Image: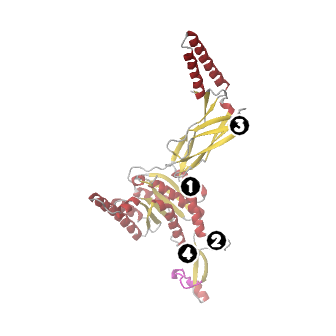
Amino acid sequence: MRFVFTRRFFLLLALGLVLLSLGWFTWQAIYLTVVYDLGLIAAAAADYLRSEKSNAFRVEREMEDRFAIGAENEVTIRVANHARRKISFIVKDEYPSEMELVTPREAQLSIPGGRSRAWTYNLLPTARGKYSFGNTQLRFRTRLGLLFHQLTFASATDVKVYPDIREARKHEIYAHRNRRPDPGLRRMRVRGQGREFESLREFVMGDEIRHISWPATARRGKVITRQYTIERSQNIVVLLDTGRLMTARIGNLTKLDHAVNATLAIAYVAAAGGDNVGLVAFSRRIVSYLPPRRGHDQINRLMEALYSLEPQMIEPSYRRAFNFFSANCHRRSLVVILTDLVDRDASAELLANTSQLVPRHLPLIITIGDTDLREMVRAQPASSGDVYRQAVAEEILHQREEALMRIRHAGGLALDVPAGRLSLELVNKYLEVKERGLL
């Protein structure tokens, strides 16, 4: 129905019943009441026909092309009134039901003729993916105020929910602040670190013996050392586990969501530093692959690959993922494996395949720690059931730490990081690897 009767109409309709009761329900009173009601209905029909049509208004929905998961995203509805009179609108927008509504999705806008007004509401996406907006509806009183005229404007559109881009950019700014001098100071290269030769200078206490240039020392008659600077255009490849354990939720996000945000954070920082960034997302099979490339165009490709990833209730195949990586990436790379471990079998498979990467590549395995397990271990048990649960939690944490220790002994890097600090710790570790010249 494109109209709704107003309160004024029903009050006037009730007035006819009052007239009927005052006439003691005589035939004359009944006749007058029927004529009155028919006249009221005819007036309402004429009021509807004289009401403004949809071409008297313009409705537009304005929003970002990309929404960020876990962040409030603004949606603006702009209404233009081309009619000659001032109209008060009730505006209602059909937003994706999967998103949380932060502010009301209905608003009242009073717009003079020939003017426009805008109204903004906020949505909070809790999952990545593609979502659909419906149409926008306007409701306003007709000229006599007997009806609400209801119009629907075709504004259906889709929006993609990406990882939190703003959070990734914060980590990029953080990295720049930690690698640039304060304003007004002369910028200096990081020497004595990295793998790219920069210059020669006289040896001083604290320099590494392995950097001494013996030919230059013989020529000059004093000890000369080589200086190095951090290399650019190195390879950073993220192996992202989308298997069963990544379905666990920490707050409003899954472990995979936290891992995706961390992937985007290190990609922003690496791209800003001139490095190549690649991605291998896997479960039992390879879900997505991006060969390492540099530049911000690669960031856009990465976001397209990441936004639709969903965790699957199956065990991941580390062997298949590592074999695929080795077959497609021959250049030495920092291989960041974002995963989770709870038992010796999974850690044994991960360790066996990780050891194959050393020494050609530098593996960095990061497991997403369970805050609940650590809190359970620290808590004072109140019953025998709590004691058993604590014992299981301690065993899981012990197996995880044991697996990470074996990876370190095999020549890789390993971290167990709480989900809330995952992006920050990953960026810090990447900067440390660069500055120490481990690649």
Instruction: Identify the secondary structure beneath mark 2.
Output: loop
Farthest bottom residue in view: 221
Sequence-earlier tag: 3 or 1: 3
What crowding class fits label 4: few (fewer than 14 Cα within 10 Å), some (14-19), or many (20 or more)? some
Pointer 3 with pointer 2, Cβ within 8 A: no
Which circle marks residue 193 in the picture?
4
| Cα–Cα gap, marks 3 and 1 | 39 Å
Residue 332 among magenta residues: no
Sequence-earlier tag: 3 or 2: 3
| Cα–Cα gap, marks 2 and 1 | 26 Å
Please tell me in which quadrant of the rendered image residue 228 appears.
bottom right
Give residue 41's position: percent from left, percent from top.
Answer: 61, 20
Circle 3 residue: 112
Give residue 67's position: percent from left, percent from top.
Answer: 56, 49
Which circle marks residue 165 in the picture?
1
Sequence-earlier tag: 4 or 3: 3
Seen at 48% across and 54% down, the residue is 257
- 66 or 410, which lies in front? 66
Please tell me in which quadrant of the rendered image residue 93 appears.
top right
Q: Nearer the viewer, mark 1 or mark 4?
A: 1
